[in-house]
Amino acid sequence: MGVLLEARGLKRYFGGVRALDGLDVTVNEGEIVGIIGPNGAGKSTLFNVITNVFPPTAGQVFYNGEEITGIPPHEVARKGLMRTFQRNLLYPPFSVLDNVRMALHLKSGYNFFEALFNTPSYRRKEELVDKQALATLGSADILALKDRISSFCSFGAQRRLGISVGVATQPKMVLMDEPMAALNPEQVSNITKFVRQIRDAGTTIAIVEHNMRPIFALCDRVVVLAQGRKLAEGTPAEIRDNELVIQTYLGRHGSAAAH
Ligand SMILES: Nc1ncnc2c1ncn2[C@@H]1O[C@H](COP(=O)(O)OP(=O)(O)OP(=O)(O)O)[C@@H](O)[C@H]1O
Ligand SMILES: [Mg+2]
């Protein structure tokens, strides 16, 4: 298992705020790596810099053997590094199935003239898109909702759809920012199952979360951030027992961390 993603000496300053302050993080192919830490630790900023929503102040990002520092977000996505966002990203008036189909069309290259004249190559692409979209909804466990307008789905189903949109193209790697935030225990366990399936289907995952129980259950490795730096790194068992981590972060999440 080689290194798939590497952030080297990453810094990102916002005025006087050091959101990232010299961070080294690696993710190996096939892993689920958890990124945890207090509010404002720099977790979302790390994902934003990796996908170049904004560039780093200093440092480098390597993905799949090449440097991707500073390349546009759509180029990052085209290389198979996708992300999901802290809020749900959907086209509310469209059906569940159409939301995923649109994500796939962006990848397969939607050709207006092919579509207009309904050419054989267009029909072949459409069949493939439908097949992949339905398979994704199946593993998200929302296939039964495929024709429902997405904004009429439950909050938990919308969250799983948001993730489906990110992973429908079967990216090599996905960055998930708080996929379990504000969900009830049953919805959290549904997402946990879905995340595990995404990994088992061959996608490497980095996941930011405040829900400690699913993070410790899911992750091969956990990286703890505080004030833009790495506070600790290790297996879930090592992190759970790390005094510094308990003092800085887990203390406040103690009941969840104990499980
Ligand atoms: N676009 C921005 N402009 C200015 N400051 C920002 C920006 N994005 C993040 N910051 C600041 O950088 C720091 C790190 O923020 P970040 O969102 O990365 O934290 P986080 O670990 O994701 O926190 P949370 O757990 O609350 O989501 C914070 O002080 C935040 O206010
Ligand atoms: Mg965040």
Image: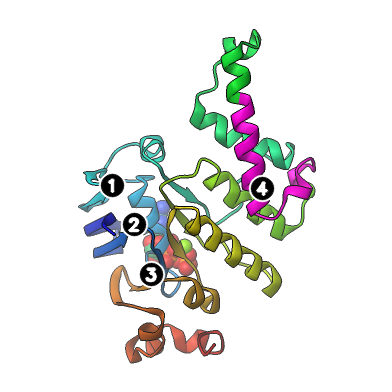
Give, as a three-letter code, the residue at label 4. Answer: Leu
Give, as a three-letter code, the residue at label 1. Answer: Asn
Q: Label 3, on which residue?
A: 41
State the separation of the CA atoms marked 3 and 4: 33 Å
State the separation of the CA atoms marked 3 and 1: 26 Å
Q: Is 132 part of what is drawn in magenta? A: yes
Q: Earlier in the sequence, mark 3 or mark 1?
A: 3
Which type of secondary structure does the marked residue at label 3 adopt?
Answer: loop
Label drawn at residue 29: 2
State the separation of the CA atoms marked 4 and 1: 28 Å
Q: Earlier in the sequence, mark 2 or mark 1?
A: 2
Q: Are marks 3 and 4 in contact (CB under 8 Å)?
A: no
Q: Earlier in the sequence, mark 2 or mark 3?
A: 2
Can you tell which of label 3 and label 4 is closer to the viewer?
Answer: 4
Ligand 1 is found in the corner quadrant, namely bottom left
Q: Label 4, on which residue?
A: 137
Tell me the crowding category of disc 2: few under 14, some 14 to 19, or many 20 or more residues within 10 angstroms, Cα based. Answer: some
Observer-nearest residue: 162 or 145?
145
Residue at the spot 62% in from the left edge and 25% down from the top edge: 126
Percent x, y for residue 228?
Answer: 31, 67
Give, as a three-letter code, the residue at label 2. Answer: Glu
Q: Earlier in the sequence, mark 2 or mark 4?
A: 2
In the image, the residue with mark 3 has its CB under 8 Å from the nearest atom of ligand 1: yes
Q: Earlier in the sequence, mark 3 or mark 4?
A: 3
Q: Are marks 2 and 3 in contact (CB under 8 Å)?
A: no
Observer-nearest residue: 118 or 245?
118
Residue at the spot 43% in from the left edge and 75% down from the top edge: 38
Which type of secondary structure does the marked residue at label 1 adopt?
Answer: loop
Tell me the crowding category of disc 3: few under 14, some 14 to 19, or many 20 or more residues within 10 angstroms, Cα based. Answer: many
State the separation of the CA atoms marked 2 and 4: 24 Å
Can you tell which of label 3 and label 1 is closer to the viewer?
Answer: 1
